[in-house]
Image: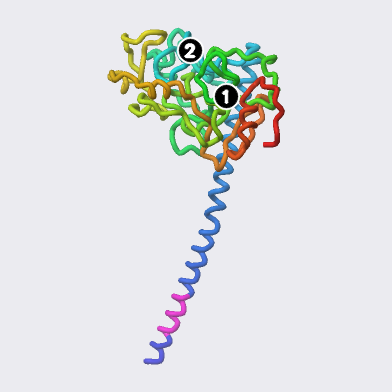
Amino acid sequence: MKSFIDNAKQQSGFVMIELLTVILVIAVLIALLLPAVQQAREAARATTCKNNLQQIGLALQNYQMAHRVLPSGSVNSTGPILNQPVGYHVGWLIQILPQLDEKTAFINYDFQYGVYDLQNRQIVNHFIPGFYCPSNPNDTFNYTGCQNDSESPIDINNNGILFLNSSIREEDLKDGRSHTIFIGEASDGGFLSWTSGTSSTLRNMGSNINSSTSAPNRISIRSNYGGRGRYSFEENHDLDGMGGYEIESFSEASDEFTTEDQLSLLKVGGFSSYHSEGAHFCLGDGSVKYISQLTDTTILKNLANRHDSNLLGEY
C-alpha cells in the first residue's frame, strides 16, 4: 500500500514538472511573437495613414483641375494669421470637401460666416475618418498643408503650397510636383478644428521632422478643445473683424497678452507623427513617401519650397 502511494506521488510530481515546462515554453513564444504582432499592426496602421494622405492629395489635384488653382490655405481679410479663434479663417480642407465625397458637409457649411461662428458648429464637429492617423492615440486630426520652407507666420508671401489667400496655379509649381510637398503629418493636430486655416491645418519646414510642434499659447492652454466633437463656440460682440466668435472657455479671459504670448500666436510649427523616426508626406504628384527625421535640413526646406529651383539630394 505504501509503495502504491509513493508511486502516485512520483507520477504526480512528474506531471507537474511537465506542465510548468509547457507553460514556460508558451510564455517564451508569446514574448517572441508579441513584438512581431505589434509591428504587423503598426504596418497596417501606416498603410491606412498613407491611403488617407493619398486621398487628400488626389482631392487637391481634382480641385485644381476643376478650378485651375489649388485652394487657399486660409481665407481671411487680414494677415498674418493668428492662432486664436477670432476671424474668418476658412481652411483648405473645407474647400476640398466635394472632392473627398463629403458634399453634404460642404453644402451645409455657410460661407457667409467664419469657422468659429455658431452657424457652422455642426460642420466643425463633423467627424471625417480620413483626417485621422490610426497610429494617433488621441482624437486630434493629423494632416496639414505645407505653408512655408521656414518658420514664419501664415501670410500672403509664403513659399509653400497652402497659405493665406493663396491661389497656386500649375505654372507656379516651378520645382515640379514630384519635388514639392503638399501635405504632411502633424501629431499635435491643433485645438481650433480641421476647418480652421491656422496652425491647426498648416505647418512648415522650419524645423526637422518630429523636433517641433505647434506652439501652445494661452488660448490653447486654457482650452480643453482639440478632440473630435469638442469644438464649441459662442458669440462675442466685443470682438472686431470678420466672425466675432471665440471658444467658450476663453470668452471670459481678460488678461492682455505679453510679447511672448503675441509671438506664440504667430508661430506655426513643424511636421511630426506617431510613426517611428519619421513621418508620411504627400507630394504634388500624388505619391506618398515616408521621410526620415534624420533627413538633411536643406533637403527638407527644398521640398517645402515650390519655386526655389534647387536640386534635391537623396532622401
Label 2 with label 1: CB-CB less than 8 Å = no
Name the residue tied to disc 2: 79
Name the residue tied to disc 1: 146
For residue 116, the mark is none
Q: Where does the N terminus fall, quadrant-wise?
A: bottom left
Residue 117 percent location from the top left of the image: 39, 13
Stretch in magenta: 8-17
Mark before the other along the chain sequence, 2 or 1: 2
Magenta stretch, main secondary structure class: helix
Residue 189 percent location from the top left of the image: 47, 29
Residue at 46% across / 24% down in the picture? 267
Question: In the displayed image of the protein, which residue is found farthest to the front?
Answer: 259
Q: Of discs 2 and 1, which sits in the foreground?
A: 2
Find out whether residue 15 is within the magenta segment. yes
Q: Amino acid at mark 2?
A: Gly
Q: Amino acid at mark 1?
A: Cys
Residue at 56% across / 24% down in the picture? 145
